[in-house]
Image (cartoon, coloured by chain):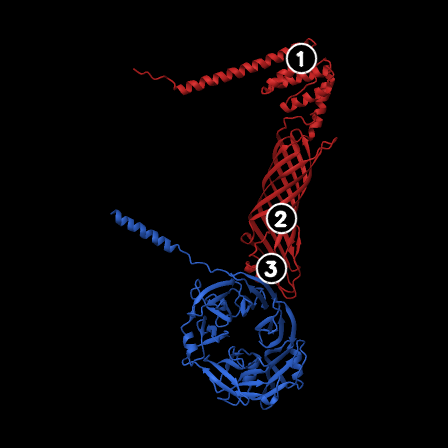
Amino acid sequence: MRTSMNALGMALIILLSVSCRKEEPVQEMPVSDVKAHPIYTVHVKRLPQGGYLLQCVDDPTYRRLDFAQLMSADGELLQRIDYAPIRAAYSTDLDKEFYITDIVPMGPDRYAVIGFGIEVTDTGYPTDLVIHQVNTNGEQVAEIIERPLGSIGITEHESFLYPTYKERAIGVSTPNGDLVVALNMGLYSGPGTHVLKLYRFPLSGPPSTERAISFTGPYDTQGSFMWSIQPSTTEPDKVLLLQSDYYLFNTLRKLAFTPTAIIEEEVDRPSFPFVFRPYVFLQDVDGTYAFGGNRVDWGQVLSGFFPQIQQGACESALYQQYQFPPGYGNAPFQCYAGAFWNGKLALLTSAYEAGVIQPYFPGDRESDLGLMFISPEDNTVTDYRTLIPGQGMRGIALFNDGGQLVVIGTNYPYENTSLHHTFFMRVKNG
Amino acid sequence: MNTALPYPMERVMAGLLGYCMATIAGMAQMDCIQRYDDAKALFDNGERKVCIQVLDTALNRCAKDRDVYGRMLYLKSLAEAGEDSLDRMRRDLERLYRSDRHFVIKAYDPLIKGRTGEAELYGAWENLHTDLRKDLGRWRAGVSVSFSSTIIRTTTDRKVLASDEEMDYGTSIGWDAGGTMEWEIIPNLALTASAGYGVTGFEATNGPITYKENMTRVPMSVGVKKCFWLDRSAFVPFARINGGFGWLLRDEAQIERVDGQDTRYLRSINMDRLAERRQDQFWLEGALGVSRKAGHTVLSAEVAYDHALTTLTLDSAPYTNAELLADYYYVDNTLFMHAVVLRITAQYVLDYHNKNRIHP
């Protein structure tokens, strides 16, 4: 009888201890040097000379790039390259418009402003790839480069007013000073006429070495997405292009430049349907690739390291890597930026309430800004830390600045307005 | 047959010892009274010098019997007044006061009425009390009330919204009240200690932001106080140096942001900031003041400067309040909270120095 009473007591104690156990709170990671500026940033690049280049819009409703903002390494705003005079310089003919989609730093005081030039005619919208080179003061420093792409229809033309990742030309500067531009655009002339093209402009060499290549998909008539273009860290004379079709079948290409052509050396293409937005694509110094982003339908962060491009390998491996930080259950996560840090992949995340609207979580002002650390050994989450909890701050960019993580993002600081501001902060190691 | 004693032997012995001691004390008291009576008889016979000699001898033996000791000093002072030994008279009157501060000499006392030196004695007693107004005693305790005006010093210039101006820190009037005690290790040099309860705070603004923070704390201090006797004044100036320690009990902040070019109005909110503050605060205090005695109560007023040795803010805390950071664009600067303090103190003298100080 006593034995059974002891057992009953022990069971009660265990039951109480289990039922009273709280979930461990998520630890915070301290930040410092927080600064905010009344501008709305949609994309950030690191400048070779130090500091950052922010691409900004005046009115988020239209999502049209309106200016580039130089930012110091300490988060202070420097010069602004206003796009209005650049557009005006191109649109001397009132029927021509310049839709700017990217800006590429080509040197300490030289930037290539890239976009589409569209002429409005009675028969259609002849469109050119346009490259306008300016200095830090926005003054034109070279002849405008125009390359005809074809004529787009009214639907595509309207899409330029509300561009997302579709209809985009993006560029990168190669180590030898060339400009490489990749673009995607749908044409009016019917199915199968989607333009997916890559150019190499020898800005410092003879014009005769300009090259271009067109790809044959995958893409869909509804458009495609251009995610990233960057030089290979192990083979600086080659570039990596990450792109996907409308259904987010991602393709990673390695492209080499010969005196006469651009060669598609390697391609990694998914072998099965898989909806993944690879906002983060990084190369480590040893050539390892790291991906981070979201599975769209579930709002979960996916990430992983891969040693090399292999047919279907990246996506099939990523498929297994839904990342759930401890303490958040099945809360939706968003990840727009990442960086290598202390031998791990650091992903900048926003954790949302389950009820908010996916995939872009518009209007959210309560999400937790945090960092998720992914191990290169087994692609698992080794740590998750909150930076700013509950304030809806959205991370746009993450950089490793000499061992210290720098976060740049946007937020809605005031509940009673739709004002967007850009914030900068440093993450203290700890 | 029960042979046990009704009381244990130890209790019997203790009782006997107590009886003996009481008897000895009683005999000593009887001896002192006898000596006083002898001296009084000599005084009545006009033999004041012999009276003084008898009392001089007796005082050494009867110092512990305060009543007889006082009466002896009184008689001796009267005899000395009659002998025109006024310095000795004054010295003995002060000894009398320090022996029994409640001793009263009445002008109509039959002992002195009509005696030679009556006027000198009474006048000296009156003058002594005037002079004793600056003797603040050896041990005193009482209460104090302080009003403080904070002086904020920052070592950082943190600003979140680039278009905001630098924070401008303003004063806030605080108060505290509590107990205080002083003990003079040598005349005019005292060790001090105090403890209390109070409220302090500060204000900060940069135009659009108005931030107020109020702290409730228990301040404590220990220090050294040096008094200075001025020849003809009953006021006693003093200087004091204290080491202070305070423990924060509560810390509440109120913040508001008004419309700006890039900002919008945000309602005023209150928030608890204790978790982002150092609860243990240390400071040094220097004070100058003046005291005056009323009866056996010492009233003091002083002006002090508190120099904070520790920051109010935690090193790791400026960016941890997410709501202040992301909504109001407010972060703390590393902040030292100094203060100018006006303090009023009332202390009762619990004990005086045994040795004469007016007529040594």
Give how far apart the Cα atoms at labels 2 and 1 are: 63 Å
Q: Which residue is disc 2 drawn over?
A: B308
Could you tell me if residue B267 is visible in this image?
yes
Q: Are marks 1 and 3 in contact (CB under 8 Å)?
A: no
Q: Is residue A187 visible?
A: no
Find out whether the residues at labels 2 and 1 contact each other: C-beta distance under 8 Å.
Answer: no
Q: Are marks 1 and 3 on the same chain?
A: yes
Q: Tell me the element at label 1.
A: helix
The Cα atoms of the two marked residues, 1 and 3, are separated by: 84 Å
Q: Quadrant of residue B16?
A: top left
Q: Is label 2 in a helix, a strand or a loop?
A: strand
Res. A45 image quadrant? bottom right
Q: Which mark is residue B51?
A: 1
Chain label for disc 1: B
Instruction: Name the residue at 60% across, 64% down.
Output: A35
Write down the chain letter for disc 2: B
Q: Secondary structure at mark 3?
A: loop
The answer to which of marks 3 and 2 sits earlier in the sequence is: 2
Residue A418 lies in what quarter of the image?
bottom right
Which residue is the extreme one toward the left? A1
- Disc 2 residue type? Ala
Q: Residue under circle 3?
A: B330
**Percent of width and height locating residue A334:** 49, 70
| Chain A, hue in figure | blue
User: Which residue is found at the position 31% from the left and 16% from the top?
Assistant: B2
Q: Colour of chain B?
A: red
Report, in whole angstroms, how far the alpha carbon at label 3 lies from the one at label 2.
Answer: 23 Å
Identify residue type, mark 1: Cys
- For badge 3, the amino acid type reads Tyr
Q: Earlier in the sequence, mark 2 or mark 1?
A: 1
Q: Residues within 10 Å of mark 3 (few under 14, many from 20)?
A: many
Q: Are marks 2 and 1 on the same chain?
A: yes
